[in-house]
Image: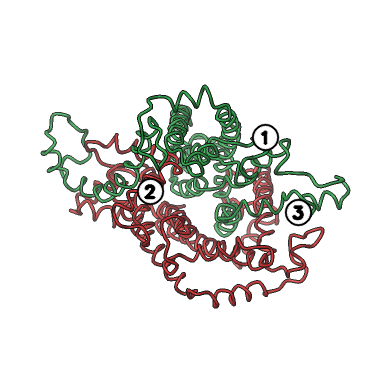
């Protein structure tokens, strides 16, 4: 009880630590139990499996680094997926993140009623669980598709464009749809976070010579909500690296033009049930996200300085 | 409204009054900047709303308009027939409609309450106390968000089987308690709170748990509401997929998605079903967002 808030001293025996901070440990315990059973155990299981040839039916045999070697040296489709995912992540991640924040900040400038309406409109796409279905109707390949019918009846195009099966358009459409869906969890947390910014700080800033909203944003608003910015960044990274092309362009996509790491993973993990190989893909994806997260954290630490 | 008109008269000039209204009367806001912000928001609002409007429109289109060339966004002759068909279909199904609704209710209520309470309990020490293993736990919570669910599905299923939870609603509820998304969000919000708040509670003799429930949780209500929204969304959209087999324990979203994926002949009904499964989360979202606003207005943290 009395030790709360003080730094941990490594010299305290574990039992003493457990006794003196009983309340703290009791609070974490219920969640930790579920976390270990339903998250930590399955993840560890998958990591171990990535060194085997486990296929759900036969008992797994240890293959060392074979899965990883195959991925990078023998699987040209994986390299294609890696490249596609990289393109999607580099565009959707930063653009979506900045859009979400800018929009959340702008909305908080608005009066309350207007703000709620706009928030609902922008978050709407994330609430529509079947978002892809709507877009497949809009970009349907034949002349009944909304985009094709409009373009043809206006005389801009002669025939139907294969939006979702022509490699020329597929990637662009995926990027548009992903940006459309980018006002998600990160966006909501920004809105909630912006409301926690202390108004007295802003008033003090006005006294200290902050003359416009842009200065206020950089010197007051951004620094006081750094934890939420980090949260949003992690959401953006996990979202951007987990984009699946197949939801829109079908699997396999034409010429694998939108084949992403997640598509590759789902193919091996759910269709072929080559769990060993799929686990190796998941581990690579995980390492990519962790690395990217480290990088972003370094950048975000410079905000407001 | 009256207050608003009063303000126009007192400041003179409609344009000025509008800017004052839009910027909530803060003096360091320029007119040009405000106009730019409004245009920017409007452009994205149109982009965001268009496909949704398309979906809403489809649900009210009669059959022949659904296949009209060229297609329209809004129905020319709006009809409620699709919803009537849906109602008839639901009442004819082997398992009564109310059964699905009940299952979803159990799923959503237990899932949301449990997840919010457990994550808040874990988030508080992670944000505001020192203890052994804190660093390890913090990073595990974040990294858990980055491991693909597609590979953990198999081990997860094995664990659920071992625990004898397969084919019961607990197979969805209990794993949701381990979700780290809400926990991590709450942790970040709690980190922004001043330590003095907790010290004051300690001096008043409040226990650790009591401090969380009556001091911390009310202050981070915007975060709690946000967590509630996406927890709700996750549970609402869960169709039970690979863990539920018995028809009468399946949730509403299973029934709706089954209808939505039926053939061309039922396209109208499918659109109505899609709209319905979209409408409830929107309703919940509007209610919670307004609630967030109210707490901010009364807690004295704003303005």
In percent of width and height, residue B196 lies at 28, 44
Q: Is residue A89 above or below residue B222?
A: above
Q: CA distance from mark 3 to mark 2?
A: 39 Å
In percent of width and height, residue A272 lies at 50, 41
In percent of width and height, residue A260 lies at 57, 36
| Residue identifier under label 2 | B179
Instruction: Name the one closer to the observer, A89 or B254.
Output: B254
Q: Quick check: marks 3 and 2 in contact, CB under 8 Å?
A: no
| Residue identifier under label 3 | A146
In the rendered picture of this protein, how many numbered marks are placed on residues?
3
Residue A111 seen in the figure: no
> Is A127 on the left-hand or right-hand side of B62?
left
Does label 3 or label 1 sit earlier along the sequence? Answer: 3
**Closer mark to the observer between disc 3 and disc 1:** 1
Chain to which mark 1 belongs: A
- Tell me the shade of chain B: red
Q: Quadrant of residue B10?
A: bottom right
Q: Which mark is residue A50?
A: none
In percent of width and height, residue B65 lies at 77, 66
Residue B25 seen in the figure: yes
Q: Element type at marker 2? A: loop
| Residue identifier under label 1 | A255
Question: Residue at the location (41% across, 56% down)?
Answer: B243
Q: Spot the green chain and give its letter.
A: A
Question: Residue at the location (62% across, 67% down)?
Answer: B272
Instruction: Name the one closer to the observer, A194 or A236.
Output: A236
Q: Quadrant of the N terminus of chain A?
A: top left
């Amino acid at each position: 009880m009395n030790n709360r808030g003080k730094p941990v001293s490594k010299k305290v025996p574990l039992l003493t630590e457990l006794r003196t901070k009983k309340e703290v440990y009791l609070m974490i315990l219920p969640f930790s139990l579920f976390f270990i059973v339903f998250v930590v155990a399955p993840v560890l299981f998958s990591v171990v499996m990535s060194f085997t040839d486990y296929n759900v039916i036969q008992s797994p045999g240890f293959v060392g680094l074979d899965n990883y070697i195959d991925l990078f040296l023998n699987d040209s489709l994986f390299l294609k997926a890696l490249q596609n995912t990289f393109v999607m992540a580099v565009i959707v991640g930063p653009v979506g993140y900045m859009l979400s924040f800018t929009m959340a900040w702008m909305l908080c400038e608005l009066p309350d009623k207007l703000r709620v309406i706009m928030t609902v409109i922008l978050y709407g796409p994330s609430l529509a669980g079947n978002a892809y279905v709507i877009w497949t109707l809009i970009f349907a390949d034949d002349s009944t598709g909304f985009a094709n019918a409009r373009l043809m009846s206006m005389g801009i195009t002669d025939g139907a464009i294969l939006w979702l099966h022509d490699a020329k358009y597929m990637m662009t459409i995926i990027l548009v749809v992903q940006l459309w869906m980018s006002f998600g969890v990160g966006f909501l947390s920004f809105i909630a976070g912006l409301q926690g910014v202390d108004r007295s700080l802003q008033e003090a800033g006005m006294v200290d010579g902050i003359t416009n909203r842009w200065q206020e944003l950089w010197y007051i608003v951004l620094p006081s909500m750094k934890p939420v910015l980090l949260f949003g960044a992690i959401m953006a990274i996990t979202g951007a690296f987990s984009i699946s092309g197949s939801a829109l362009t079908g699997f396999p996509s034409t010429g694998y033009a939108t084949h992403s790491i997640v598509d590759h993973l789902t193919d091996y993990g759910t269709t072929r049930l080559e769990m060993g190989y799929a686990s190796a893909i998941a581990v690579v994806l995980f390492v990519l996200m962790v690395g990217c997260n480290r990088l972003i954290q370094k950048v975000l630490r410079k905000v407001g300085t | 409204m009256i207050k608003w008109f009063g303000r126009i008269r007192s400041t003179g000039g409609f344009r000025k009054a509008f800017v004052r209204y839009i910027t909530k009367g803060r003096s360091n806001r320029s007119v040009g900047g405000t106009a730019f912000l409004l245009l920017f928001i409007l452009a994205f609002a149109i982009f965001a709303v268009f496909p949704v409007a398309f979906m809403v429109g489809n649900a009210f289109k009669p059959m022949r308009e659904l296949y009209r060339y060229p297609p329209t966004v809004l129905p020319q002759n709006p009809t409620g027939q699709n919803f009537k068909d849906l109602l008839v279909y639901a009442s004819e199904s082997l398992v009564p409609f109310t059964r699905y609704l009940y299952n979803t209710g159990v799923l959503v209520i237990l899932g949301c309450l449990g997840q919010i309470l457990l994550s808040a309990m874990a988030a508080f020490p992670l944000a505001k106390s020192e203890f052994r293993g804190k660093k390890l736990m913090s990073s595990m919570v974040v990294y858990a968000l980055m491991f693909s669910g597609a590979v953990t599905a198999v081990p997860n299923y094995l664990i659920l089987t071992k625990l004898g939870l397969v084919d019961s609603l607990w197979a969805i509820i209990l794993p949701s308690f381990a979700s780290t998304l809400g926990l991590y969000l709450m942790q970040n919000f709690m980190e922004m709170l001043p330590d003095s708040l907790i010290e004051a509670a300690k001096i008043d003799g409040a226990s650790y748990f009591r401090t969380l429930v009556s001091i911390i949780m009310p202050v981070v209500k915007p975060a709690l509401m946000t967590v509630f929204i996406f927890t709700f969304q996750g549970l609402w959209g869960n169709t039970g997929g690979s863990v539920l087999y018995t028809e009468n324990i399946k949730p509403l979203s299973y029934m709706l998605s089954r209808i939505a994926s039926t053939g061309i002949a039922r396209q109208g009904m499918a659109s109505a079903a899609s709209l319905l499964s979209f409408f409830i989360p929107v309703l919940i979202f509007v209610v919670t967002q307004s609630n967030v606003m109210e707490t901010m207005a009364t807690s004295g943290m704003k303005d």
